[in-house]
Image (cartoon, rainbow, N blue to C red):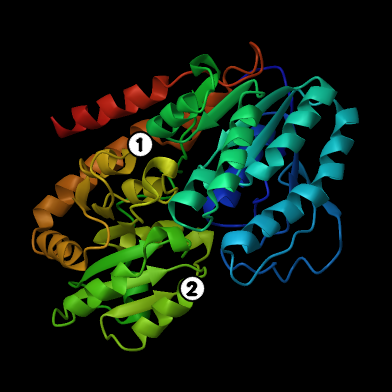
Amino acid sequence: MSAKPKKILIYSANFAPEQTGIGKYSGEMAAWLAARGNEVRVVAAPPYYPQWKVDADYPWRPFRSKMWRGVKVWRAPLWVPKSPRGRARILHLMSFAITSLPLMLAQIFWRPDVVLTVAPAFVCAPGGWLTARLSGAKAWLHLQDFEIDLAFSMGLLKNQFLKRIVVNLERWIMRRFDSVSSISGKMIAHLIDKGVEADRTAYFPNWVDVSHINPARSAWTYRVELGIAMDAVVVLFSGSMGGKQGLNVIPEVATLLAARADIVFIVCGDGVMKPIMEAAAAKLANFKVLPLQPFERLGELLCLADIHLLPQNSEASDFVLPSKLSGMLASGRPVISTSHPDSELGLVVSECGVIVPAGDPSALAAAVLQLAEDASLRTELGRCGRHFAETHFEMHRVLERRFGALDSGLVPVSGTDGVAEDAKAMEDVMV
């Protein structure tokens, strides 16, 4: 990291204290930068995710600011729909883009060196770019997923005329930024397909604190609390329960394996799919639902699993790479994912777990049985995943690699150098 402090403005609708998804990563990044002597400011919405309800600690007040871990955080209000789908989701994101724009433009007089806009929400990209240009800062756009492509591929938006307009506008905006980063190699390739010059792209994967998630950590407390036998095989999904995860398959698999009392399914988190999971749990003895757990217990929770489940809708493909993957790998447990074998998620999980087709409960049940009955295979696959997480998703390494370029040009290291390196590392682990 540069010895000379920088002024860094982060524009992210989701931010700490949200414990999952983009809010978690934006918060950890801001705190990491501030701890290294940089002056960091953030413009964000009040915490609302994954519950899709504004946190009770943030009662209505249009705008507020507060210091958090050495970071100055401004909050702008937004509308949070009960059902975040289609037009309601667009209005939700637009509401924040509109209310936050005055806060962003006010930062011009602070004269930041870098303005980092995190998407979703892509509708904030014009405001982030404008703030950077008016203040003389470098404009950096980071894409956690391709929300526009995802919305159309999953049928959330269907109007083809609207699609052409939005896609062309997206391409135009992306090409205005000094740097555009994303979290996987195939997402970087998708950026280039959209017209972003390769030398202005950057690989910036989601990271994990491998010291906090340690495979040696005992999870017996959770087993006692939940009444799970010490020799039972726990199959865990932990994270936001959104629509794009394809979570419906989990209770279907639990139903298929209901006769196996030694296999217990646990779904932990919050989101729009939670009521469906709770309804299933009321009918199945081998299926449990837990609320979102405190961050302090995350390591213990992930190590409760003998097998991690990572379902994914086939339509999502390479438009998104689940952020929860890095934590699963760090726990040293194998992962079963429903994804395309040639997707980035499929390529990683195939070396440290099992890939099955999306929407096939029977295939997923067979994969669970295979791993449940082969402890040595679980150990070997978990070892591969842990090594990969330690070597290439470790928090300080990822952040140092991306922010190490702030002295020369104030943009992240360009290209997909880390993508090829990470792929080679997984091959080496399997030798």
Residue 390's label in the rendered image is 1
Find residue 166 and report its horizontal and vertical position in percent: 61, 41
11 is higher (above) or lower (below) than 215: above
396 is higher (above) or lower (below) than 119: above
Identify the residue at image location x=63%, y=42%.
122
143 is higher (above) or lower (below) than 202: below
Identify the residue at image location x=42%, y=78%.
276
Quarter of the C terminus within the rendering: top left
The quadrant in which residue 18 appears is: bottom right
Q: Amino acid at mark 2?
A: Pro
Does residue 413 appear left or right of residue 360 in this picture? right
Find residue 421 and report its horizontal and vertical position in percent: 33, 23
Quarter of the N terminus within the rendering: top right
Question: Does the rendering let one see residue 254?
Answer: yes
The quadrant in which residue 106 appears is: top right
Q: Amino acid at mark 1?
A: Glu
Dot 2: element? loop
Does residue 171 appear left or right of residue 328 in this picture? right
Find residue 400 and report its horizontal and vertical position in percent: 53, 25
Identify the residue at image location x=43%, y=58%.
244
How crowded pointer 1 is (Cα within 10 Å; few <14, some 14-19, many 20+) is rated as some
Residue 291's label in the rendered image is 2
Dot 1: element? helix
358 is higher (above) or lower (below) than 185: below
Question: Does the rendering let one see residue 49?
Answer: no
How crowded pointer 2 is (Cα within 10 Å; few <14, some 14-19, many 20+) is rated as few
Find residue 158 and report its horizontal and vertical position in percent: 51, 55
Question: In this view of the protein, which residue sits in the foreground, 175 or 422?
Answer: 175
